[in-house]
Image (tube, rainbow, N blue to C red):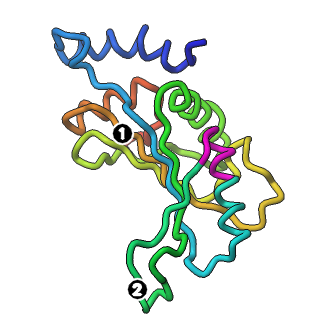
Amino acid sequence: MTPVLKTFYQEQVLPELKKSQGYKNVHQVPCIEKIVINSGFDASIDRGGVEETTREISRIAGQQAVVTKARKSISNFKLREGMPVGVKVTLRGANMYDFLYRLLAVALPGIRDFRGINDKLDGQGNYTLGISDHTIFAEASQEHKRTIGMDICIVTSANTDAEGLELLKLMGLPFRKKNS
């Protein structure tokens, strides 16, 4: 079964972008390539905390998360090479569209006093959203002891920020209104 957001992209966003940007070929139209969810934690966290964070991020993403380890030792941070420092998961295809749909339809509207997200992209058409509390997702367990922050990076095939911003607006990302 095709995800709802993928169908929306193919039937409404693609023709709109093709018309507004003047693309001659469907393959020139920017699309979302992948979504990377990344969560870092304190290097001194115990083994149970690492597993709990991995389990929570995996539950939210709908796909198994990978523990990232330190590449080199840094004495000021009490960090040794090989210690776990974070968790990441890369979503593509149907999982990506399902996660983005849950983010846009359930998680972001559920934030208290939500006024939209910042519209600053990275210069190459990609967008990163920082979330300080993982409990905005319905899949997250409520008995978790700590709040988990995460970065959600939406990687697009857009060449410029303007193309990426237009794609993300048409996909339904609730950007903050400018006060003019």
Measured from the top left, where is residue 171 in percent x and y? Answer: 44, 25
**Nearer-the-camera pick, 115 or 174:** 174
Question: What residue sits 38% from the left and 30% below the top?
Answer: 32
Measured from the top left, where is residue 123 in percent x and y? Answer: 22, 47
In the rendered view, tell whether residue 9 sits above or below residue 131. Answer: above
- Give SS at disc 1: strand
Q: Tags 1 and 2 in contact by the CB under 8 Å rule?
A: no
What type is the residue that disc 1 sits on?
Answer: Val
Return the residue found at the far bottom: 76
Q: Quick one: quadrant of the N terminus? A: top right
In the rendered view, tell whether residue 44 sits above or below residue 113. Answer: below
**Nearer-the-camera pick, 175 or 164:** 164
Question: What residue sits 43% from the left and 91% below the top?
Answer: 75
Question: What residue is pinned by disc 1?
Answer: 155
**Nearer-the-camera pick, 69 or 19:** 69
Q: Which mark is residue 10?
A: none
Question: What residue is pinned by disc 2?
Answer: 74
Q: Quick one: quadrant of the C terminus? A: top left
Measured from the top left, where is residue 100 in percent x and y? Answer: 53, 33
- Give SS at disc 2: loop
Give the residues drawn in magenta, as a range: 56-64
How many callouts does the rendering have? 2
Left/right of residue 132 with respect to residue 56 in the rendered view: left
- Callout 1 crowding tier (Cα within 10 Å): few <14, some 14–19, many ≥20: some
Measured from the top left, where is residue 102 in percent x and y? Answer: 62, 33
Left/right of residue 114 with respect to residue 124 in the rendered view: right
Overall secondary structure of the magenta section: helix
Mark 1–mark 2 distance (CA, rounded to whole Å): 30 Å
- Callout 2 crowding tier (Cα within 10 Å): few <14, some 14–19, many ≥20: few
